[in-house]
Amino acid sequence: MSFFKRWSVYILCLFLIAAVYTDLTQGSLPTIPNDNRINLNYTAKQIKVQHSDTVLSVIEKINSPISQLNVENVITDFKLLNPDVDPFQIKIDQYYYFPVYE
């Protein structure tokens, strides 16, 4: 019986060493792709919001070919320029930074 216990301890240690080696070299947790790349293909312009202006209407005024722009990217860029502002709740007579795409 002692022989069986000894070999089980050796095999258990061998599996433990293999698991630790695999964890340290390859990792065991799935990796999440990094999509937090900042797109800096624009400059910022400070504009005072008028009555009935929305983020997209101001973007349309200051950028000529709006058809090429993705709405989600525009909203994301607006949030990057104005981190404490909800793009769907902008206030009249306030100044905000809007992206001007190149």
Image: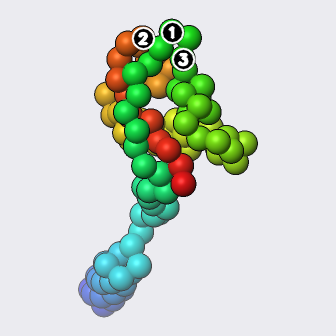
Front-most of residues 71 and 4: 71
- Res. 72 visible in picture: no
Sequence-wise first label, 1 or 2: 1
Q: Which quadrant of the view contains residue 98?
A: top left
> What residue did someone put label 1 on?
51
Q: Which mark is residue 53?
A: 3
Give percent across and percent down for residue 94: 35, 17
Give percent across and percent down for residue 31: 45, 63
Residues at circles 2 and 3 in contact by the CB criterion of under 8 Å? yes
Front-most of residues 38 and 34: 38
Q: Which mark is residue 92?
A: 2
Q: CA distance from mark 2 to mark 3?
A: 8 Å
Q: Is label 3 in a helix, a strand or a loop?
A: loop
Q: CA distance from mark 1 to mark 3?
A: 6 Å
Residues at circles 1 and 2 in contact by the CB criterion of under 8 Å? yes
Q: Which mark is residue 86?
A: none
Which image quarter holds the N terminus?
A: bottom left
Give percent across and percent down for residue 22: 38, 80
